[in-house]
Image (tube, rainbow, N blue to C red):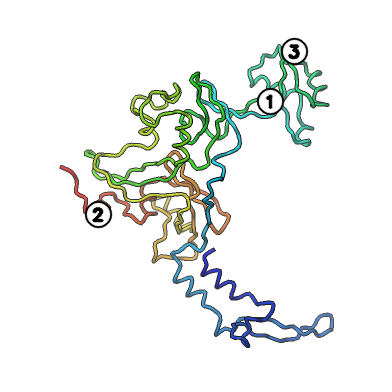
Amino acid sequence: THHRMDAAVLSFIPPGAGLNSVMYGGIFEEIRSTKEINGNKIRVVKMQAAPELKPDLSALEKDSQTECPVINIRSKSKCKPLGDSTFWSVDKKGETWQRTTLIPLDKDELKDFTPEKIREKLLDEGKTASDIPSDKELEKWLRNPKYSLHLKDGQPIRFVHKKGSKGDFKNPVGWSGILHPNGKIDQLRKLDLVNDRLELWVGFDPKKGWQYYKRIIPSKDSMLGLKRLGIPWRGQKGLPEYTVQLLGKKCKDLKVYYCGTLPKYSHKVGEFKKGDCFLLDVSEQNHKKQNEEGTAMFSSDINISSVNEWFEVSAITTDKRIELKPIITDGKKFLEGNMSNLAQLLKLPISPEECAQQNGWKAPR
């Protein structure tokens, strides 16, 4: 939490040794009273902050109402893991798969595991029904699955693959691994910090006039991951076939596809990074207004009310949106990608034309 808020809260905690007593220049005083319990009178001594000496929290909140009271300290260690510990495999279509055990490791889940489920997993793995042992043999193996299950042709099966839950590899940004000349990929894993920031630009379109544009910038780890894979950021030479198909005819390279394009006359007006904080209006009335008019849930410095809540940018998605989550409460996360809402979060005019006029930018002739 904020250091000033910490100081205010700590000042209300009675000291055990009494060193913060009014007798020694502190703010606490002894309040003696008696309390009757089961007919017995008991002396009670309380330490309470003197009203004329205790800090004015309302004044503190008023002075710092536009400043987030919580400070999240992020690790700057170079030894932190870059991504998850799972290694993924990629098929010829660019889909990712995760290796998992044939049967559950949890004993409770293993009780409900049947030969039919094993057969279903093996069929999904591409095994033929004629190679799979009978239900009687599978049931016998389930009683003591200490060793690998063997198919009828003698092939041992201990692991199977399930479809990846973190997207495919058609867009390789955010992945790290080793890409071999024959197309096989080893040591593939998903990186934690895929995108560094989401930029907001104002550009002039000859047909539409001044417009807002979004531009996503990959993180340093993502660029190092592409370099390790040997996948080019510019040009299509060396790209896997499924990535070339993803780019299509309109995008000449991965940079254009991922970051997007800007008009010739463009100006950057703001950006969003992970950890940025915003004060949002979470009232039902504002939610209704937002759905009807598309306005942002941003509270200005003047309009601070009890229904406002601090949100933090917890992620920047590949589809050029920011994920906002509450900082102080355990509320619901939501994604925001609307141009007007993003502009208001940055305290910019909803109209890009008005933004250009305020900055003195003239339309090119």
**Residue 15 locus on image (x, y percent):** 66, 77
Callout 1 crowding tier (Cα within 10 Å): few <14, some 14–19, many ≥20: some
Q: Which residue is mark 3?
A: 152
Which secondary structure, mark 3? loop
Q: Which residue is mark 1?
A: 159
The amino acid type found where label 1 is placed reads Phe
Residue placed most toward the observer, 161 or 119: 161
Disc 3 vs disc 2: Cβ atoms closer than 8 Å? no
Outermost front residue = 78
- Residue most toward the bottom? 23
Mark 3 vs mark 2: which is more N-terminal?
3
Look at label 2 and name its amino acid: Asn
The amino acid sitting under disc 3 is Lys
Q: Quadrant of residue 17?
A: bottom right
Alpha carbon of mark 3 to alpha carbon of mark 2: how far? 75 Å
In this picture, residue 163 sits left or right of residue 17: left
Q: To which residue does mark 2 refer?
A: 359
| Mark 3 nearby-residue class (10 Å; few <14, some 14–19, many ≥20) | few
Label 1: element kind: strand
From the viewer's perspective, tell me whether residue 264 is left or right of residue 334. Answer: left
| Image coords of residue 91 (percent x, y) | 54, 22
Find the residue positioned furthest to the left.
Answer: 365
Residue closest to the eye, 307 or 263: 263
Residue under the point 52% across and 31% down: 177
Q: Mark 2: which secondary structure?
A: loop
Q: Residue at x 55, y 73 (%)?
A: 8
Q: Is residue 146 left or right of residue 185?
A: right
Instruction: Indicate whether 349 appears above or below 2.
Output: above
